[in-house]
Structure formats: structure tokens, C-alpha cells
Amino acid sequence: MEELKKLFDQAKEAYEKFSTFSQEKVDEIFRNAALVASENRIPLAKMAHEETSMGIVEDKIMKNHFASEMIYNKYKDLQTVGTFYSNKALGIQKVYEPIGVVGAVIPTTNPTSTAIFKCLMALKTRNAIIISPHPGAKKSTIAAAKIVLDAAVAAGAPKGIIAWVDNPSLEGTEYVMKNANIILATGGPGMVKAAYSSGNPAIGVGAGNAPAIIDDSANLDVATSSIIQSNTFDNGVVCATENSIVVLESVYDQVVKLFESKNTYVVRKEEEKNKFRKAMFKEGKYGLLNAEIVGRTALVVAKTVGISVPDTTRFILVEASSTSYDEPLAHEKLSTYAAIYKTKNYDDAIKISKEILTMGPGHTASLWVDVAKNESKVEKFKGLNPGRLLINSPSSLGGVGDLYNFGLDPSLTLGCGTHGGNSFSQNVGPLNLLNVKTVAERRENMQWLRLPERIYHKYGALEFAFDDLKEWGIKKAFIVTDKVINQLYGKRITQQLDKLKIQYSIFDDVEPNPMLSTTSKGAEIMAKFGPDLIIGFGGGSSMDAAKLMWLMYENDGKAIDFKDLAVTFADIRKRIVKYPRTGRKAKMLCIPTTSGTGSEVTPFSVITDDKTHKKYPLADYSLTPQMAIIDPELTMTVPKMATNAPALDALTHCLEAYVSVMSTEYTDGYAVQGAKNIIKFLPKAYHNGSEDQEARAKVMDGAAFAGIAFANAFLGIVHSMSHKVGGYHDVIHGAANAILLPYVIRYNAACVLEGGKQAYFSQYATQNSLEKYAQMAKELGLKGKTNAALVDELIVTVQKLTKEVELKASFKDYGVNEKAFLDSLDKMAEDAFDDQCTGANPRYPLIEDLKQIYLDAYYGKPIPKFEK
């Protein structure tokens, strides 16, 4: 108790200092803490999983990312300091004032993400916080708190502003709750009750037990996919997860069949149901869940319960009929199984849901319905007591906000209101003081098609395109290229500039895989020259380097932290780090001399850090050029080995953009036409390049089409993995893509077949990789009686093309050392999972899956066919 008293004394002293800080300083601390927390999301997730054995590492990574990036994005501009409302006529002012010391109780199910969230909330509101971890998750909880503390202190926060109980106990937790100014408690009903009984103000959030109604008007395919997606997210430990599925009798059999087709095992035998009832709770005490089946995979749950299920099972549904308190199946489960109820009609479904909610009132409920045609049903749904009423959304991720509805505040502490014995019903945030009920309807993310202002193409376009520089009033141009390209084609550019009497300077030190030091050097020279036009001229490396130099130049001489630019984001519009705005001082013109990266039309740049030798794919629309000149005349003499790998890179752009979770009808057309051009004309361009003007033009156009497609739909794990194998083992990027692409096509297309995880993106309603690849195969003129057969043909076509242009089929064939490859395997797979491209992949990859793909690709393992 003496140690705890000292902890509180230090926290109160830190609070007194922190309470005097300005909004600007608070926001700087808040940003730095969020950024560092985001950077540490993977080790914290791994630590939490190792310590608790609950959930899935990859999903915990996503929760940690949510707790840092989404929370920062939501509240970064929120005023929390000083006078925020003033009315002279009324003579009133309203002033924000911090509370003091927050006592935070952290659960074992979400130890690191909840700790990050609560620490950031305290920092944003100038409060001190003392954390009481769950004994079963103290190591990871404390690690998360320490990371946020160190980042906050580094930004100027008082040293004791975040603290924790090193050896948590019941007595220690009681001391924290009795001595805090306010309690922020997340946990079971007993813990929440203790918080409210402490004698201090408390914000407690209790158990969930969310029912999900499936109406007969619902899109049943989307509903079943989303419910599986939700229940398998972190193996069901999110308290907003659907625990009971209530289905109208008219569609019940159809719903069950859809679930079963998506790797769900349905428990129908009473003997098996009783095994679940017996296994759910410790010592038969309702509410005291058996930790052996909490947060476990469906296969582990089945084994522990004692039933036999297929190896591909991802989710388990147990048929139930009773909703009484003494029916275990009607209670909260926090795992990868749920009860399923058959109901006569919609009114009966509402009645059953109300009864289920007596065992977890106030938290969350969801409804799958055609909203436009059933307003009266939505009105009846609003009569349920939860604080979150979700429509057509996966409950676990829909409930936390900012993922499936962008008006619902993001939070990892979800109030249950007075119905659940809580002080309020909203998602906890800095200013949540009211008991408010929220109805959240699923919405898709807004998307875009963003292109360069002008794209010139066709043979000989270079000379004509330069006339636009007159219109722009260009006076000084800075050319970024490499020595070989400058020697071969430099005069083609300078002659045009001379005609227009435009002064120019040439920087030709760009190397393959441009280094950060090179771009920094070029930016310094550029700043001294002061151009109003920057020309990226050459292969992808030159254009990528030019883009980063442009960004540095536009930043008005202020230093840019490259590490900040390279921070991975989940949503490009919600990233923690914002790029400088470009185009104020200079315009960007890109002129490719190879057919591959598509950098001339994309907002991407790949730069290598000299110190770590790690490749960073930078992505931001501020990097999009204003003009691209695609002149195949510049590629006529490109040698074979600079033709094949870049073109396979471009083909990968097409296929990954086509199946991306962010693909749209706007991007699909570009992806299809790009793939057609490359597959049909690459062999001719490769073997007869200097003599076949049409083939060169078609492949170059194909690469640009591919660039437009992936600039707006993004990529997938082929590029994630290729970036790492290139960085670790110097395999040419396009060659690495050519090796990995067939394996990833098979992996993505087999998602449902193998019980894989559907990627998380609001517009990506059902897993459709197999169908999309098959459609691409049809567009390419391939034949097959089924979608599976078409995908097999697509894989064979990619492999044949790779062989025809003399690229190798495995990393081993390229001479990559076996021991070095295996030694780096774990790190490559983890880095690939965290790569910027992974988020748009249609199958949410597990790190172990990436390792297996790497191994298969290293040894050139034959790819199994779907149709044997």
C-alpha cells in the first residue's frame, strides 16, 4: 500500500503540472504518443497473445492500430483546453478542466489496445492515469502503458503522468478505485460493480451479449459473411461480437446453408449441445466464463468441448430455443461460437432479442434488413435497450466505430447505459458525459479516381507534350534521372527545354532502388536551383526519387522526418502523419523509359533507408504528378532484361488492383485492359523489342493502365512480400512479383475453400476472390467451365508468360542462399504483414500463411489445381 500511495502522490504531482499545459502542447504529446503506439502495434500484439493465449495476433495488431491511428484521427482537432464556448450577451463562458487522476482497470481480453486507448484519452484531456492490469495480462498491459508514457515524456509530458500497478491484486485494484478521481473500468460485471461501489465517480462498461437479427429482406450472403468475419475477429473476444443469431423461419434453412458453405459447423444434436452447455462456465457459475474456450479458434473450442468438426471450420453455431437465464447458450460467450435461434416472424425476433439482452443489457444489438423497404422494422429495432444498434454491419467492428460507420465515435470502451448498470451508454471519448443511444447504419467508405492532370501517350508524344510548358509559364526545370538514361536520352529532354528557353539543371545520381541519402542530396541541390518544374525521367527509381525530392522541396525548407512519411496507415485519409501539400512551388512531370512501375501516374514512391536497407513504399496523393508523357519511342532500345521483370511487375499491379478490397468499376477497366496488353504483347516486345513498335507501345500503355488501377485501388500481398524479399535478398522487384503472383492468386482464390479470413473494409461485403480472378480470366480470353477451372488457367497463363520471357520460377533458381532465406523468414513474413500493401489484399493473411507462401516460392513448389 505504501508503494501505491507513492504512485498516487507522483501522479497527482504530474497532473498539477500537466493541467497547466496549452492545447498546442497537449496535442503534440497526444500525437507523439499515438504515433509511437502505432509503431509498436506488432510486438505489443504478439506479447498480449503470448501472455493470454487468447485471440489472434494479426487481429490484435489491427486493434492496436485502431487504438492509436483511429483514435488520434478522431480527436486530434478536438479542443480540450481552455474556453470553448462564450456568449457575451448571456454572460456565459464554458471552460474545459481536467478531472485529476484516472484509475483504469484493463481486461485480459484486450490488454494492449485498451491500455493504449485509455492512456491516449488521459493525455488528450490533461489527466494523469494509473493502470491496474489484469493479473493474467500484466506484462503486455504494462508494456503498452510504458511505451505510451515514454513517448509522452519525450514530447514534454510530466514523468509520472502514466503509471501502473506492477503486481496487480484484488487489494491493489480496490486501492486504485478508492483513490482515483474517476474510474475508467473495463471488465466483467463484478469489476464494474466494484467500480461503482468504490465511492468515486466511475465510467464502467460491462458485459456484452449482442443478438443479431437476420430479417427475410436482408442480403443473406452479406449477413452471413459479415457475422463470420465479426465472430472470427480476434477469436470473438470483442464484447460487441454477435453471441446469438436470431433468424426468421422463412429464411432459416437458407441462412444455415450459407453459413455451412462458409466453413461454419452447425451443432444440431442435443448431445453436442449439452457438451457446450457444460463447458461454457467455470464450476457451472453463469457469467464466469471458462478461459479454456474464450478467444480460441473454432477448432480449439470444438476439441475442448469434445466434438468433432471439419479441419476447415472457422465458426460454430449451436442451435438453441430457450432464452431463459438457466440456458447457458443464451449468455455471453466471447469466442468463435454463437447460438442460433429460429423465430416465427419479425416481432418474435424482437421478443427473443429482448430476452437474450437480459443477460447482457445495454451493450450492442444488430439487424440485417433492407432498410429502404422496412422502416417500420427499423423503428421496432430501436426499441431494444443497447447503446449501439447496428444495421447491416459486423457487430464486433461495427460497434467500435469509425470502421463501418464513420459517424459513430471510435472507442475501445463501450458504455451500456443504465440498462447495463453503467453511467452512460455511448462509446467512451473525451467528452462523453451523457447517456445517448446511437443508431448506426452501415456505410461504405467514399472512394475516388485520382489521375495526373494530363497524360500524353502514343509514339512521338514527347515533343508535342512539352508545348504545355508554355501554358504553365515554366522558367526553370530540374531533371532527375540516372547516368545511363541521361547519356542515352538526356538530349531528347534538354533539346525541348532549349527550344522553350527553359533553364535546367540535371541530377543524374539516382541508383537502382534509390536511397534516402540520394534523394536528400538531390533535394538540397534542387532547393538551391529553385525550379518551377521537376522532371522525373527514366525508370521507376528515377521517378520515385524525383517525387520524394519534390516533397522535400515543397516543404519550405522544413525538415521532413522520413520515418514519419513511412508510417503504415490503415486508411490513407486518416493517417497519423500528413504529407506536405505539393504543387505550390513546382509542378511534377514524369517521363518513363521502361514499362513497369507506372510511377508516372501513381501517388507512390519506393525509397530505401540507407541505415536499415529497408524499402519503404511511400503513398500519398501529394506525390501524384501533374503530367505524364508515355512515349514508346523511348523504350524501343530497352534491353531484354529491363523489359521482362518490369512488365511482370505491371501485370501484378493489374491483378492485385482487380481483386483489391478497394477495387471499383472505375479501376477494374484499367486493370483488365492493362493485363490484356501485357499478356498479349509482352513476348513480342521482349523478343523483338527494337523492331516491334506496336508491342512496345501496347506494353507501355499496359503499364500505365496498371498504374492508374493500383493508384486508386491499391495492391496486395504479392507486393508486400516482394518488397521484403527484395530488401533482404536483392531479388529484382518484378522478378520477385513474377514468382509470388501465381502462389498468391491460389491463396486468395482459396480463401473460402481453406477457411481463410475475409479482409476488413466496409465496401468489401463478401469474399469474392475466386469469382474476380475467374472474371479476369474470361476477360483475357481463357477457357474453363467453372470459376475454379478459370483460375487454374489464369495461374498457368502467368507461369507460361514468366517462362516465355525468361524469368525464373523460384527464389532458389535466382541463387538466393537457402540458409540466409530461412534465417530471415520470420522477419520477412512479419514485415510483409505490416507492409502498406497488405491492407487491400482480399484475403486477410496470417503471418504463418505468408511464411508458407515464401517457402513454396523459394523452392518452386507446384501449385495445386482447384479442379483435378
Image (cartoon, grey):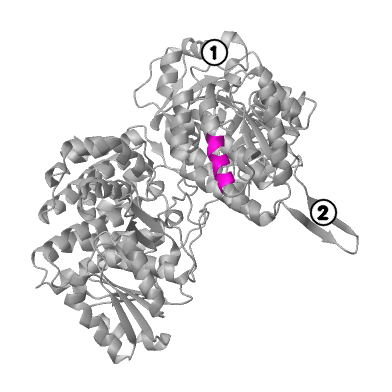
Magenta region includes residue 152:
yes
For the point 67% across and 40% down, the residue is 428
- Left or right: where 538 falls relative to 516: left
In this rendering, is residue 484 above or below 371? Answer: below
Q: Which residues are magenta?
A: 144-154
Name the amino acid type tagged 1: Arg
Q: Against 564, is 535 above or below?
A: below
Res. 515 visible in picture:
yes
**SS label for mark 1:** helix
The tag on residue 529 is: none
**Whole-percent x, y for residue 38 in the image:** 49, 44
Q: Horizontally, is 17 left or right of 634 in the view? A: right
Query: Residue 270: x and y, percent?
Result: 49, 12
- The one nearer the camera, 161 or 739, is 161
The structure residue drawn at horizontal position 25% and vertical position 51%, both measured from the top left corner, is: 777
- Label 1: few (<14), some (14–19) or many (≥20) C-alpha neighbours in 10 Å: some
Estimate the spatial distance between the alpha carbons at disc 1 and disc 2, rounded to whole Å: 54 Å
Q: Quadrant of residue 644?
A: bottom left
Amino acid of disc 2 = Lys
Q: Which residue is mark 1?
A: 277
Front position in the image: 215 or 198: 198
Measured along the vertical axis of the image, is residue 737 above or below residue 449?
above
Residue located beneath label 2 in the image: 94
- Foreground of the two, 244 or 216: 244
Q: Crowding near pointer 2: few (<14 within 10 Å), some, many (20+)? A: few
For image coordinates 50% across by 56% down, the residue present is 577
Is residue 104 one of those drawn in magenta?
no
- Horizontal arrangement in the rendering, residue 231 relative to residue 624 (left or right): right
